[in-house]
Amino acid sequence: MYHWEPHIPCSNRPVRVTETSCCGEYEWCCEAGQFFVLRHTDDNGYEETGRGRYLQARQVWNTLVKAHQHKRVP
């Protein structure tokens, strides 16, 4: 659905996380004036999608959260 790529910080300022999906799979973030959706990878890293201006990135966030299936832990 969306192209995910490794998150490479573009600033020495910390990434601001202002929202998290119900089980923490997605995080709504801002860094250096750009917005994006972040998620954890299996190797304890992060990847991102939707980086850009607020409206563009927010549409990605809304779509992902709406289609999100809560992870169940056995």
Image: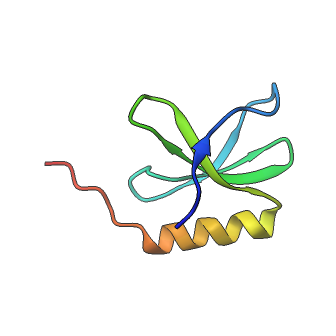
Q: Nearer the viewer, residue 52 or 26?
A: 52
Using the image, determine if residue 56 lies above or below residue 7: below
Q: Give percent across and percent down for residue 17.
A: 64, 45
Q: Quadrant of residue 60?
A: bottom right
Q: Toward the viewer: 7 or 12?
A: 7
Residue 67 in the image, given as x and y percentages of width and height: 44, 73
Is 37 positioned to the left or the right of 54 in the image? Answer: left
Lateral position of residue 3 relative to residue 66, left or right: right
Residue 15 coordinates in the image, percent (x, y)? 71, 37
Q: Who's the residue at 38% across and 35% down the image?
A: 42
What color scheme is it? rainbow
Q: Is residue 37 above or below residue 32?
A: below
Residue farthest along the right direction in this orientation: 33
Residue sticking out furthest to the left: 74
Give the answer, above or below, for where 69 lies relative to 45.
below
Toward the viewer: 22 or 3? 3
